[in-house]
Amino acid sequence: MSSLPQLVHIVFIPLLAQGHMIPVVDMAQIFASQGAVATIHTTPVNAHRFRTTMDRSSELGMPIQLVEIPFPCEEVGLPIGYENLDILPSPELLTKFYGAIGKLQEPIEKHLRERTPAPSCIISGKYIFWSSETAQRFGIPRLVFHAMGCFPVLSAHNAKHSNCLDSITSDLEPFEVPGMPKGFKITKAQLPGNSVRQQDFEVFRGKIQEAEMAAQGVVLNSFDDLEHGCIEAALKAFSPREVRSHFGKLHLPNASCIVHESLFIFSKEPMRPKTAGQGILDVGDHRPRRHLPKAKPNGNESDMYRRGNKASSDAEKCMAWLDSMKPRSVIYACLGSLCRLAPSQLMELGRGLGASQQPFVWVAMLSHLAIGGFLTHCGWNSALKGMCSALPMITWPLFAEQFVNEVLVVDKLRIGVQVGAKVPVRWGEERKVGILVREDEIARAIHALVSEDEEGEERRKRAAELGEKARQAMQEGGSSHFNVSRVLQYIMAGPTQEAV
């Protein structure tokens, strides 16, 4: 583990959602492995999900801490224990849920005032808008974390800030997304931001936009080789004097754009120390699952299996069955922690998996050598894990930016096969939507993925090459490892705003 010439204390405040907390824990471990003090603030239910991983990190000598802050469920009218988005049974509870998150500000600030060393930087989820005020009070920078890659963010930004949507009369009418390195079509319904119809939630959007405008940077989860020119396009779209996010505009003097292998930061200030002519950096966060060096943080594969919420199946029997299978022969099916498909659609999925006559599993370690394909909802964490595990994918997007991620996996990287989903499944409307993908479509996609014809072999070859690039990006001495130190040096340079 590296040591820093002075103590750097990075505070992480993730959104209480599985897809946000997992990459934040990974990120905290990466910085802690470089000698920074890392503190993750969360609630008891969420802390329990990551306790094993965090305890092992501490045993390895990492300066990392998981701080539990009581979640005020009763105070806002939520049932006790409703501390994560995947626990909420209805979108009608979203306003109360985010209201409860807002009440975490005071106890977190109290903890930070009492904590030694003092905080040097806050990295928080974009929905944790009040952390902007917290950063101002401590006179430190705040970086906004988006749990997605450059491709979907740039796509959403270009669609919103052009006039291409003005002539669209139907949510299901395909249109060309402008300003992308390679053109592609998508429908209005498939754009990010259409997954929840909750009027009360709109009050938070303005606060989120305002806080993001005040931030010193935006962090995205990606690495350069999977973006296919989007980084360069983003550098043009987000101009040096007016950096735009997909929520609004940030007017930034002397802005520099720093892109990492998993940390994509639009920064208000040039990195210090500054290297002439270098505006793009690569820093790792989401480590390749299949090729983890044993000396790296979180390098124990059992730790990765224990991260997050625990599956209810008999894990040992599942792993024993996988151990008995031939390498690359099993389809891994996972539609994410927020999957709320109608029972009829889940039954159709089961029948389709059975009709494929291909071994499959719904609960397993994605990096197991028996896994040869990944049926995924294209949530960014899952898609990135599939890429880093060198796996070809069957894509079944459900909501949020997942349809855009599908375009990246299938059309740009050419490592996936579409199952045929065209319409998003909005939270609370699952039974109304019913069956969108039929048994025969699921079986067809699986057959295409495992096919040994030239197309199937080329798809697997491309997936393996991408996995190798991800592995190389994370090796010690590689660009990601080097630029983590650059980010830390930027933070060490001192406060970027006066404490208020």
Image: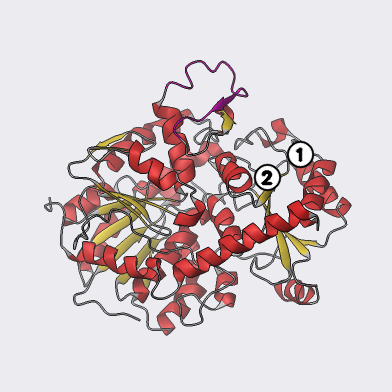
User: Image quarter for residue 314?
Assistant: bottom right
Over which residues does the magenta segment extend? 163-179
**Screen quadrant of the N terminus:** bottom left
- Magenta stretch mostly in which secondary structure? loop
The amino acid type, in three-letter code, at marker 1 is: Val
Separation of marks 2 and 1 at Cα, in angstroms: 9 Å
Q: Residue at x 32, y 56 (%)?
A: 123
Q: Residue 455: x, y in percent? A: 74, 51
Q: Label 2: which residue?
A: 396
**For residue 58, which quarter of the picture?**
bottom left
- Relative to the observer, which residue lies in front, 8 or 450? 450
Q: Secondary structure at mark 2?
A: loop
Query: Residue tagged by mark 1?
Result: 437
Residue 348, quarter of the rendered image: top right
Q: Residue at x 38, y 63 (%)?
A: 283
Image position, residue 406 (x, y; %): 61, 44
Query: Image check: 54 left or right of 336?
Result: left
Q: Earlier in the sequence, mark 2 or mark 1?
A: 2
Q: Is residue 8 above or below residue 148?
A: below
